[in-house]
């Protein structure tokens, strides 16, 4: 009887694995996991930390799925004035064979004063490289940005937002806030920052209700997402449910405006996510989301829809007789990608 093959064992992790908020400089920083918002935060935090240490930091971006031979070693080569370098590499989960081979060779002897950050969003592509880094090649660290799936994890995240700012939020207010923004960590973070910026003293359930009335039942961004994707019926049902639950039309319109204006900024723009994020003052995940949302839209349709946004804004703020009708019309036009404007 033939012997059974030995079972494959998991790669032993020989490097520190840290949360996004514990990121620190290292020659190699692997940012792994599916939670893009937390990954973007970790990447910005590392960049800011390095710039505080040395304002002359030179930042370069690479896309691993578009990698050309020699790019990494060229960026890591010493410069004339010996500035420290941060090389941010995205799309490692879709990397080319050349990228894997040259990065493994580079990690045998990383350059001095150079920090290589590798963003891997999940999947099996690039496993050989990840296993080598986790095994200690290059002397790096790993920042694990797993998706926050449980309510307890989202509660801890939101609580940390207020704690780090030295502000207190009551348990009831925290539950209400997480309930209102449970589907999207980026929206939850934005809501926390708005409360920190606008609310005074202790943040209570009354405070959350004041800012986000109706959001616990229906998220305004869900309505906008459905309409932008062309799902008119779904968007209309969500809108009516939100309004019945007490949602204010003004924040509802604001969700549409935020998304459509970001789409307008990115329409026709060329470059990778990191470059466009810096150019337009956005996070890379916002660039990626806007690009996906733009599928099926034309410049004329987008322009007509944004004009309708201004008209709808005036109608729901006293310029029209029926704010609900104005919102429903806007949802119809958005779902038709501007063709009914």
Image (cartoon, helix red, strand yellow):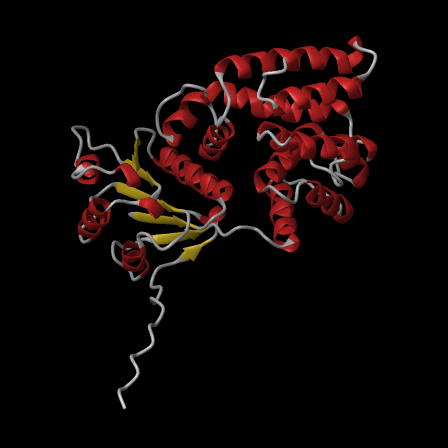
Tell which of 34 and 159 is nearer to you: 34
Residue 229 percent across, percent down from the top left: 57, 31
Label total for image? 0
Residue 79 percent across, percent down from the top left: 18, 31
Tell which of 169 and 327 is nearer to you: 327
Q: Is there any visible trace of residue 25 in the rendered image?
A: no
Residue 303 percent across, percent down from the top left: 55, 12
Q: Residue furthest bottom?
A: 1
Q: Residue furthest top?
A: 319
Task: Tell me which residue sits at (25%, 45%) in the image.
Answer: 96
- On screen, residue 9 above or below 173: below
- On screen, residue 215 above or below 299: below
Q: Is there any visible trace of residue 182 in the rendered image?
A: yes
Classify residue 136 by image quadrant: bottom left
Task: Tell me which residue sits at (75%, 40%) in the image.
Answer: 216
Tell which of 115 and 229 is nearer to you: 229
Which quarter of the rendering shows the C terminus?
Answer: top right
Task: Tell me which residue sits at (58%, 12%) in the image.
Answer: 304
Classify residue 321 by image quadrant: top right
Residue 306 percent across, percent down from the top left: 59, 14
Which quarter of the rendering shows the N terminus?
Answer: bottom left
Task: Tell me which residue sits at (45%, 50%) in the image.
Answer: 33
208 vs 143, left or right, is right
């Amino acid at each position: 009887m033939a012997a059974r093959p030995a079972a494959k064992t998991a790669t032993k992790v020989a490097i520190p694995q840290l949360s996004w908020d514990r990121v620190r400089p290292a020659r190699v920083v692997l940012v792994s996991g599916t939670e893009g918002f937390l990954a973007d935060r970790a990447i910005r935090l590392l960049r800011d930390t390095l710039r505080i240490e040395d304002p002359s930091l030179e930042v370069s971006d690479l896309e691993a799925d578009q990698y050309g031979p020699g790019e990494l070693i060229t960026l890591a080569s010493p410069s004339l004035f010996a500035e420290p370098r941060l090389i941010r590499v995205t799309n490692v989960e879709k990397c080319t064979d050349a990228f894997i081979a040259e990065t493994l060779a580079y990690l045998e002897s990383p350059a001095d004063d150079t920090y290589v950050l590798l963003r891997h969003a999940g999947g099996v592509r690039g496993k050989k490289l990840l296993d080598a880094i986790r095994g200690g090649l290059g002397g790096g660290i790993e920042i694990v940005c797993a998706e926050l799936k449980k309510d307890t994890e989202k509660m801890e995240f939101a609580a940390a937002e207020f704690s780090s700012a030295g502000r207190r939020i009551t348990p009831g207010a925290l539950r209400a806030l997480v309930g209102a923004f449970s589907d999207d960590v980026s929206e939850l973070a934005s809501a926390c920052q708005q409360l920190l910026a606008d609310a005074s003293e202790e943040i209570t359930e009354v405070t959350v209700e004041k800012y986000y009335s109706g959001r616990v039942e229906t998220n305004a961004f869900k309505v906008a997402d459905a309409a932008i994707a062309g799902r008119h019926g779904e968007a209309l049902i969500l809108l009516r449910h939100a309004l019945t639950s007490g949602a204010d039309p003004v924040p509802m319109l604001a969700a549409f405006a935020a998304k459509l204006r970001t789409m307008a900024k990115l329409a026709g723009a060329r470059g990778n996510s990191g470059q466009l994020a810096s150019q337009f003052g956005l996070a890379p995940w916002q660039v990626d989301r806007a690009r996906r949302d733009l599928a099926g839209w034309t410049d004329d349709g987008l322009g007509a829809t944004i004009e309708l946004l201004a008209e709808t804004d005036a109608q729901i703020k006293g310029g029209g007789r029926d704010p609900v009708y104005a919102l429903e019309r806007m949802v119809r036009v958005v779902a038709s990608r501007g063709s009914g404007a």
